[in-house]
Image: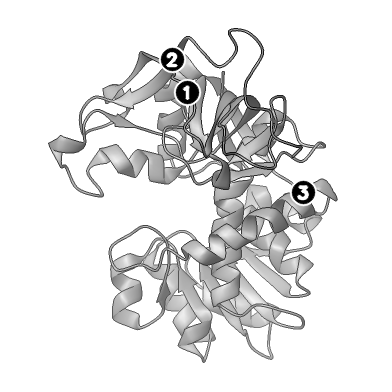
Amino acid sequence: MGGRNPSAPDGVGEGMSRYVVATAYGGPEVLALSDEEVGPPRPDEVVVAVRAAGVNPADVKSYSGAFGTDRAQLPKRLGLEAAGVVVEVGEAARRVSVGDEVVAYRISGGYAERLRVPTAALVPKPANLDWAEAAGLMLTGATAFHALTVAGVGQGDTVVVHGGSGGVGLMAVQLAKISGARVIATAGGTRHDFLRGLGAEPVVYGRGLAGRIRELAPHGVDAATDLVGTDEAIDVSLELVANRHRIVTIAGFERGAQAGINVLGGGPGADPGTDIRNAARPELADLASQGRLRVFVAARYPLDQVAEAHRQIMTGHTSGKIVLET
């Protein structure tokens, strides 16, 4: 990102912006579009014209009631990550200029046409990614980075990635391979060739999973990441990995706590890993810029079809990212 430019061209960064809001707690039917006047940035903020925003399960949970139903928090804005163009710069902002293409994470209210974000949330957009890919890079990438870091996955390890074809799973597979690990990934049979293309050894989940993994890794498994939150994923991980400190879950909060494994993310009692995830951002951007880390976009929706996008992600069977485009 370049030097500071205190203001945008005439009229840019001002005016009305559409954004998505949850008007109540419930299902996707509570989502609606609203309008607001986007004011000038505070000294350490910029205004970003959003080109795309990543859709994540946490967005759904924020209004489904999974994280509580405090009506004082309504209406609730959604969106933790986005990509776009800087159109106005606060007077104290550094290293960012009007016209910079950026990725913003962690943010609030990313489902919008324009928004104000702190400069600390920005990293340069990898030039080789399109807007949808850039918008889908950070949350899944940082989550996978956090999980693999806590599990201590590195050169020579054999790691099981439960849910290897999901959004976080695809990132975990790639990052584990980059670190020099051997990756065994669970997924439905239709995704096996795709996972092989990423260097993983796929295995079908379901009855007999532990035995199938043992056939692939007769000398044992060093670590496991549960990215789906099923009893099977946690049970098989406990059966195969001797050191419980090298097992992580990002979804099985209650079971994980009972089993004494690492519980990560935004759920009750979980470690959010804020410092690790923030530190991952420039590394993820660099790996993507080098073409070593890919973002797979499963579906793209316009902003006014946000409910349809959420219905798709709620199926739990998407392979890659779902993205809203403005």
Front of the two marks 3 and 2: 2
Q: Are marks 1 and 3 in contact (CB under 8 Å)?
A: no
The disc placed on residue 18 is: 2
Q: How far apart are the two marked residues, 2 and 1, measured between alpha carbons?
A: 6 Å
Res 166 seen here: no
In the picture, the quarter occupied by the N terminus is top right
Label count reads: 3
Query: Are there few (<14), some (14-19), or many (20+) residues within 10 Å of tag 2?
Result: some
Secondary structure at numbered mark 3: helix
Q: Are marks 2 and 1 in contact (CB under 8 Å)?
A: yes
x 44%, y 35%: residue = 79
Q: Position of residue 129 (x, y in %)?
A: 76, 36
Query: With 208 as the anchor, is 262 left or right in this view?
Result: left
Query: With 156 as the anchor, is 314 left or right in this view?
Result: left
Q: Are marks 3 and 2 in contact (CB under 8 Å)?
A: no
The disc placed on residue 7 is: none
Q: How far apart are the two marked residues, 1 and 3, measured between alpha carbons?
A: 25 Å
The disc placed on residue 112 is: 1
Secondary structure at numbered mark 1: loop
Q: Amino acid at mark 2?
A: Arg
Above or below, comparing residue 53 to residue 159 in the picture: above
Residue pointed to by mark 3: 288
Query: Are there few (<14), some (14-19), or many (20+) residues within 10 Å of tag 3?
Result: many
Q: Residue furthest left?
A: 71
Query: With 22 as the anchor, is 95 left or right in this view?
Result: right
Q: Amino acid at mark 1?
A: Ala
Q: Position of residue 48 (x, y in %)?
A: 58, 27
Q: How far apart are the two marked residues, 3 and 2, measured between alpha carbons?
A: 30 Å
Q: Position of residue 148 (x, y in %)?
A: 60, 71
Which badge, 1 or 3, comes first in the chain's sequence? 1
Q: Quadrant of residue 316?
A: top left
Q: Quadrant of residue 53?
A: top right
